[in-house]
Image (cartoon, grey):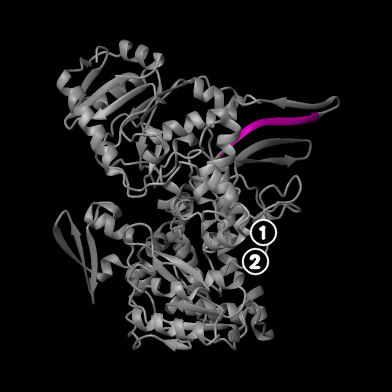
Amino acid sequence: MEQRLRSEVKALLEQGKIDRVIGFEPGSLKFTTTPLITSDGGDVDHLVINPFIVNNLSVYLTGTSGRVGIVAKGCDSRSIVSLIQDNKVLRENVVIIGIPCSGVIDLTKVERLAGKDRDELDDIVRQGDKITVTVGGERKEFPASEVLFDNCLGCEFPTPREYDILLDEPVTPTPDKAISEQKLDSLREMPPEQRWQFWKEEFSRCIRCYACRNVCPACFCERCFVEESEPQWVLPVPRWQDNLIFQVIRSIHVAGRCTDCGECERACPVNIPLRSLTREMCNLAEELFNYKVGIDKEAPPLFVAYELEEAEDLIR
Amino acid sequence: MADSKRINKEDTGRLLDEWSKEFSVSVPSRENGMPAMLPWDGKDTSFLEWYRNTVIPPKANFFPPYEKMFDFQKGAEGYHLELPPSDKQKQLIFGIRPCDARALTILDTVFQDTYQDPYYLSRRANTVLVGLGCTNPYDSCFCTSLGISPGESTDVDLMFTDTGDGFFIEPVSDKGRELLAATGGLEDGLEADEARAKDVKEAAYRKITRRIDTGDIQQRLAACFENQDYWEKVAAKCVSCGICTFLCPTCYCFDINDELSQDEGTRFRSWDSCSFPIYTRMPMENPRQEKWRRVRQKVCHKYWFYPVNLDITACTGCGRCIRLCPVNWDITQTLNNLPASS
């Protein structure tokens, strides 16, 4: 896939079909990748595809000018479609280079299983459904289901549906909702008081760095409501109450746009399980409106569409 | 060393217990979901096994993410201010790393510059820092490029070195010397401990392989300050979140906000970040609308403006900005790839 990606991108740049490309290159730390945004054909050989391509690169689309080639996993391509639906991105300005994705490795899970930090591991190798971690010369094997991100384990659309180039054969989806929503299920089982206490504690440690918002392609507002000062909806002071209100409103704002890419939770430096909120928004969009995000670029966005017969139920 | 001491690791809890009688003791803790310096619970010393460094830097123990500055009421004769009770509790931070201890020395230059910040400085005055040398630095660490040794510190009061089964304890400041003299149950340090500690410090130093060239860094930054192409390129993937600045042990920017209700209210200060597009929009506009200007500011402030103004580099090589960045933006690459001239 990697070789084909490089040659496709090289050709697109040479033929003037794109002005720049957004992809992944090796990161500066072990087992990481980092976004590469470049118009320089010389950088193309740095492009990689591996089980560590965590970022949802579509977050860069709204800030990138010209015609853009973008490397997209299944969830990322749905984010692009959602951005097209919202008129934030013009379809003709993007060349979607689709990666059929069999899931991304959650290093936090690997660290927990291996009992070592990322930089103390010698190697992590994925072969099909097995992931082999070498620590201190010793090899440990784990099933992918223990090591991939929760959202990957529940992924219904691993292969981009919207693409210009698909780099490999489609991947058969094997979503396991139960495993993917384990954390969420434990929250559902809690009595409301306990759940309130849970979120109060989680949001007590939020520092309001806004990484969750800034890595989110669905958070495309030019001015976020938390930055309004007249009226001031929320204080920038990171008290748990303000933090919770920020995140609750953000979750509602991204409902119908969130593709469960999991970036908010991954980016959070203080480990708040944000995906439990956003995943629930995806579930609600599906249950209430039979709406799956980023599937149809011609469809109006969920909360922009309005049908009279729906209104009464909503208001009631 | 004549005034050095030693302690077995299994006696660490007893030592912390003894110090708890006089101090509010903080230790590395994951109790709150990620490593931070939190009050010791009186029993758990498991951090001795897992602790490498904290996510939340110890600056938060002196300059917390937010704090109340004062309450105010509007009366007939103007405003009445009520300051929060000043924190007289003596605190002891156990296990601070040399990079983070240096960061406090750096922050001191800001908080006791022309304005003496009572909130930060009273906590500093009331605190004893007990350093713990690194034995297992992260691959993101580059402290040795900033003149810091992962195993040694002149910025703490007492320094602990892990010698395997125990710790070799060296007093660094008078405060540390006094504390050590008043602490019971410690044996005198042996020559063998000192020799072992020296090896441990040297081994830790050698483990740090990430480097930046600080030689003529001010000149190199000045030479490419106007090189917009370079800064645009390095800034392209930055998402302008606050992680690298909030979790930087030397970043000190804060915002001030009032919570108002009728004729009274509370004034808070909370961490702010030059990465945010709305930074400084309250007094006027942000002069750095474009992302590349904000990224350039962050880099130049630490390695150029700070040394010029306060004679110290505002980076300790702790690597948090690299390790915790959601897009792996790496300041060492930005510095090492600076073009020779614009």
| Closest to the observer, B46 or B179 | B179
Question: Which residue is disc 2 drawn over?
Answer: A221
Q: Residue at x 38, y 44 (%)?
A: B142
Report if residue B70 lies within the magenta region: yes
Three-letter residue code for mark 1:
Phe
**Residue A308's x, y, as percent?**
69, 85
Quarter the N terminus of chain B occupies:
top left
Describe the element under mark 1 as helix, strand or loop: helix
Location of residue B136 by image quarter: top left
Tell me which segment is drawn in magenta.
B66-74
What's the chain of the residue with tag 1?
A
Three-letter residue code for mark 2:
Cys
CB atoms of marks 2 and 1 within 8 Å: yes
Q: Is residue B157 above or below residue B107?
A: above
**Residue B244's x, y, as percent?**
50, 49
Q: Residues within 10 Å of mark 1 (few under 14, many from 20)?
A: some
**Residue B157's x, y, as percent?**
38, 21
